[in-house]
Image (spheres, grey):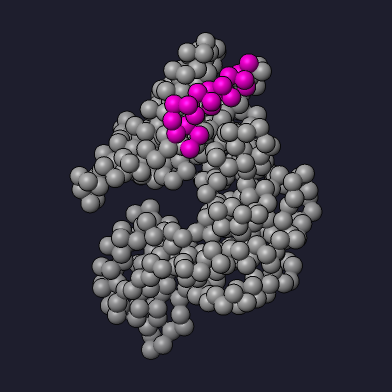
Amino acid sequence: MAVIVQKYGGSSVADAGKIRNVARRIERCKDSGNDMVVVVSAMGDTTDELLSLARQMTDRPDERELDVLLSTGEMVSSTLMAMALKSDGHPAVSLTGRQAGIRTDSSHNKARIERIDPQRIVGELKKGNIVIVAGFQGVTADMDTTTLGRGGSDTTAVALAASLGAEVCEIYSDVEGVLSADPRVVPDAVKLSRIGYEEMLELATYGAKVMAPRAVELGQVYGMPILVASSSSEVPGTLICKEASMEVRNRVSGIAHDKNVAKITVIGAPDHPGTAKDIFEPLARANISVDTIVQNASTDDVTDVTFTAARTDLVKALSIIEPVAKKLGAAKVVRDETLATVSIIGTGMQNTPGYAARMFRAMYEENINIELITTSEIRITCIISEARVEDAVRALHRAFEVEFHRPE
């Protein structure tokens, strides 16, 4: 029997009726002769509600206790799903991350999976059970509960699929697949029939919420095909996989944007070896990811160092950087929380002239100022005012519309 791993997002299991609908979809797949492992997120806005409760207790909840609290949301979903399946006559069992053998490091709130021991899951499948796993969570060597950060249930699902040798990992939510842009901003966004791992990783990293970047990365490392589809329809979704063609095709696959951006500038830092190390090593130790980094030309042996990070990490980042800047003898640290990123992503851009020029012209024609620019082999990202980011997405979608995949 083939092993299929499915994941259902919070909107797909938001209430009892939706849980029953998802249960029937799972049952159909099981009845077709498959072994089923299903990962579920917390119901609806449960995680946000739990976070709100924690912040009513303290402005800075203890990270260990917060992980224990947040993990309960997925436990509720998994147990209810198992109950729904059993009531329909399908044997099922719910497992926590610990019971499913998901071992992580000890980085609370942003833990990374170190290994998976699927012995318990395999045993339950041999008994004929549908296995429902609480997503987003794992356990340390000391048996402390951890959570995997934003999109953690996606990461759980792909990691389990890889460890079980599944044929495919199916990610279900309230969207029909990966679109060329956020449909709330661009109503006529095009659904992509398939997309390569690298392009999807860039889209996810730079704002596309349909998949978590770490899940895409895992899929690429283990060659696990990932299907992204809607839980409420039978419309074919988007397959994330290795590109079928060996030839690099010149195209833009999508436009991504992200409002969770903050800029921090260390002004008047000494321009000598070790300054960058002193600034960025403490951030790394605190698990704060830094994106764009710009260092101005030196004047009188001092320079300005600018970098961007997630706005949600801003308070923590400033608490680290301000003492470092003072120790370095920098003039001051300034921040900007009014920014966003907009990116075009597609293979072949680096070796094909004109993509950057067309992007910049589209921004110019909308009178949108670009503060910073960063690139990769398949991406160009502009950091702009948050107030204009949706205008930028629409302008770029129009400018590159002919490049998008069309449904097959």
Work out which residue is located at the far bottom of the displayed protein and give it: 300
In the image, 93 versus 64, the foreground residue is 93
* Quadrant holding the C terminus: top right
Give the quarter of the image for residue 353.
Answer: bottom right
Tell me if residue 14 is in the magenta stretch.
yes
Residue 295: percent from left, percent from top: 45, 76
In the image, 366 versus 159, the foreground residue is 366
In the image, 396 versus 321, the foreground residue is 396
Which residue shows up at 48% across the image and 13% down it? 86
Residue 226: percent from left, percent from top: 62, 38
Residue 303: percent from left, percent from top: 40, 81
Q: Which range is magenta?
A: 11-31
Give the quarter of the image for residue 94.
Answer: top left
- Above or below, 159 relative to 352: above
- Taking the image as shown, residue 376 lies to the left or right of residue 326, namely right
Which residue shows up at 30% across the image and 35% down it? 68
* Quadrant holding the N terminus: top right
In the image, 171 versus 46, the foreground residue is 46
- Above or below, 45 relative to 314: above
Question: Could one spot residue 247 in this view of the protein?
Answer: yes
